[in-house]
Image (cartoon, rainbow, N blue to C red):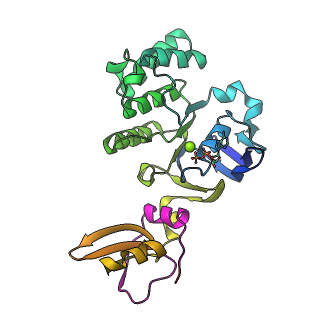
Amino acid sequence: MSNLEIKNISKTYKKGAVKALDSFSLKLSSGVYGLLGPNGAGKSTLMNIITDNLNSDSGEVLYDGVNIKKLGKDYRSLLGYMPQQQGLYDDFTLNRFLWYMAALKGLKKKEAKQKITSLLETVNLTGAAHKKMGGFSGGMKQRALIAQALLNDPKILILDEPTAGLDPKERIRIRNFISEIAEDKIVLISTHVVSDIEFIAKEIILLKSGQLISHDTCTNLLKQIEGKVYEIEIGKDKLKYFQDNYRVSNLRHNDENIIVRIVTDDIPSDYACTQTKPSLEDLYLYVFEKINQTS
Ligand code: ADP
Ligand code: MG
């Protein structure tokens, strides 16, 4: 089984003023990995380095033990990459865009024709093939970008926020689609939306300020906050206190009162707390949200 090893990668911008990645190391084998972190965590930087579109300051990326810089073209032919930015090809029809990308990837004409036809079917865009991409909805653009990433049957698929800007229905569609095509591939998906990866990732990677916080199956990660998630019924006047002092992952109204869901190391005394089963969203808050806990 092939593997991709990220070894001690560091990257700064602005002559060292911004530390985007800080000695990041991780080994990936086949399956879906969810790279989870807030904006600015370093997700795109990591993906740009893995895809060799950006040089790191130090460290290396190895594919089956060989530095990707050494593999060069051979590595690129294994790679499918969906970058974060949209709108670069708004003047292209989808068909022209895919032919253009196929040419860049060195596909032969016959091969390209076959692939484009079948991928258009896969991403459900056959009917839009001759329309300009500028007029596409967010979901259509994302699907077009995913199709482009799959032209060369990649063994490594890197998707940078593939569900950004999509409505819930489109999100589910893209998520299921990624899950379907992931077989026998190393798939890395970045997102700051927990539900995008909660059920399809075999492993979740938590990235914060350029540092790897932890990586594990969702079930194992949730063990970190076992016994730390509570629901508490409070009066409306107490809401601000809770929002200021605790990580509130959810709230719902119950007649005159509010039920807050918090994730905390310190159980608030003076309140009737019901311990609750943790979710990945609770973990996200626990890891990424700063609070000024007073208790
Ligand atoms: P993410 O994709 O998780 O939002 P990025 O990798 O885009 O994170 O950014 C990580 C950090 O590096 C952020 O602080 C961001 O502002 C900074 N950064 C990213 N790209 C550049 C760049 N080209 N020049 C300067 N700073 C950058
Ligand atoms: Mg990004």
At 43% across and 72% down in the image, what residue appears?
243
Compare residues 94 and 215 and report the one nearer the observer. 94
Residue 206 visible in this rendered orientation of the protein: yes
At 43% across and 33% down in the image, what residue appears?
142
Bounds of the magenta span? 264-293
Compare residues 279 and 42 and report the one nearer the observer. 42
The spot of residue 13 in percent (x, y) is 72, 44
Find out whether residue 290 is within the magenta segment.
yes
Find out whether residue 139 is within the magenta segment.
no
* Depicted 254 relative to depicted 12: above or below: below
* Depicted 127 relative to depicted 145: above or below: above
At 37% across and 17% down in the image, what residue appears?
131
The spot of residue 157 in percent (x, y) is 55, 36
Q: In which quarter of the image is ligand 2?
A: top right
The spot of residue 256 in percent (x, y) is 22, 77
Residue 1 visible in this rendered orientation of the protein: no
Q: Which residue lies furthest to the top in this view?
A: 109
The spot of residue 160 in percent (x, y) is 53, 40
Compare residues 239 and 112 and report the one nearer the observer. 239
Q: Which corner quadrant of the image does residue 268 belong to?
A: bottom left
Q: Which corner quadrant of the image does residue 57 belong to?
A: top right
Quadrant where the N terminus sits is: top right
Compare residues 46 and 183 and report the one nearer the observer. 46
Q: Residue furthest bottom?
A: 270
Q: Which corner quadrant of the image does residue 102 belong to?
A: top right
Q: How many labels does the image show?
A: 0
Q: Is residue 234 left or right of residue 73?
A: left
Q: Is the magenta stretch mostly helix, strand or loop?
A: loop
Q: Is residue 216 left or right of residue 233?
A: right
Q: Is residue 183 left or right of residue 170?
A: right
* Depicted 153 relative to depicted 113: above or below: below
Q: In this view, does 90 lie to the left or right of 216?
A: left
